[in-house]
Image (cartoon, rainbow, N blue to C red):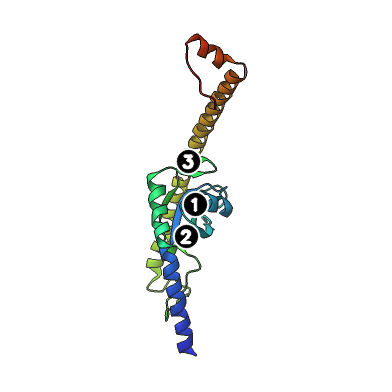
Amino acid sequence: MERSSTTQQQRECADFEEKLKRTVYLDSLSPLVTVPILKTALGQFGVVVGAQILPNYLDPKNAAVSALVELQNERQAVNTVTEINVNAFMIAGMPRPVRARPAVAEMFPDRPAPPGRRIQCYWIESNDPDWGVAMKMKQLAKKHAAEASYLQKYQREEEEKLAEQQEKALRSNYSKYELIDKLYDDKTTERLARRYNITIADS
C-alpha cells in the first residue's frame, strides 16, 4: 500500500514538473483582471490551457495581483515571456506594465508534496532553544510586509498615472478621428483637394 502511494506521488510530481515548464507567472496585474480577460490577452501568444489568479494577502482589496497561466507547450510559454518583456502587453486594447517570467514550483499553492516528505508543526514556548530564531523570523516577516505595503502604494500611484495618460491619449485620438470624419462628411477634403490639385484615393 505504501509503495503504491509513493508511486502515485511520483507520478503526480512528474506531471507537475511538465506543467511547470509550460506555465508563465505574471505580476503587476490590475485587481480588476479576470481569468477570461487573461485568456483573451494571452491568446495572441499561444493556446491558453488554464489560468489562475493569485490573491495578494497583504492588501487583498486594492493591490495588484499576479497570475499563473498554463499554455499548450513549453515553446509557447518561453515565447510569451519574451514577448511580454520586450513589447507592450495589451489588455483590452491598452498597454499594461505587466511583467512575466517562467513559473517556479513555490508559486503554486496546490503543488504536490515530494514523495517521502513530511511536515510537522508545533508551538514554541519562550523557554524553547528556537524561541529567539522564531522571534527574529516574526520581526523579519513584519518588516517585509511593511516594505511590500509601501511598494504596493507606489505601484498603485504609478498605475493611476498610467491610466490617466492612456485615457488622455485615447480621447485625443478619438477627437482626431472625429475631426477627419467631419472633414469627409462636409466635403472639405474634396474642396481642399481641388484647391491644391491633390488626388484623394477612395477608401
Please name the residue that numbered disc 1 is placed on: 42
The amino acid type found where label 1 is placed reads: Leu
Question: In this view of the protein, can residue 120 be seen by the observer?
Answer: no
Measured as percent of width and height from the top left, residue 142 is found at 44, 56
Report the Cα–Cα distance between label 2 and label 1: 9 Å
Q: Secondary structure at mark 3?
A: strand
Rendered view: 146 above or below 196:
below
Q: Secondary structure at mark 2?
A: strand
Task: Write the residue at 53% across / 52% down.
Answer: 38
Measured as percent of width and height from the top left, residue 192 is found at 52, 12
Q: In terms of sequence position, does the residue under pointer 2 or pointer 3 come before the other? A: 2
**Nearer the observer, disc 2 or disc 3?**
2
Q: In terms of sequence position, does the residue under pointer 1 or pointer 3 come before the other? A: 1
Please name the residue that numbered disc 2 is placed on: 71
Q: Are marks 2 and 1 in contact (CB under 8 Å)?
A: yes
Task: Write the residue at 56% across / 24% down.
Answer: 175
Measured as percent of width and height from the top left, residue 20 is found at 43, 65
Rendered view: 160 above or below 148:
above
Circle on res. 68: none
Please name the residue that numbered disc 3 is placed on: 95
The amino acid type found where label 2 is placed reads: Leu
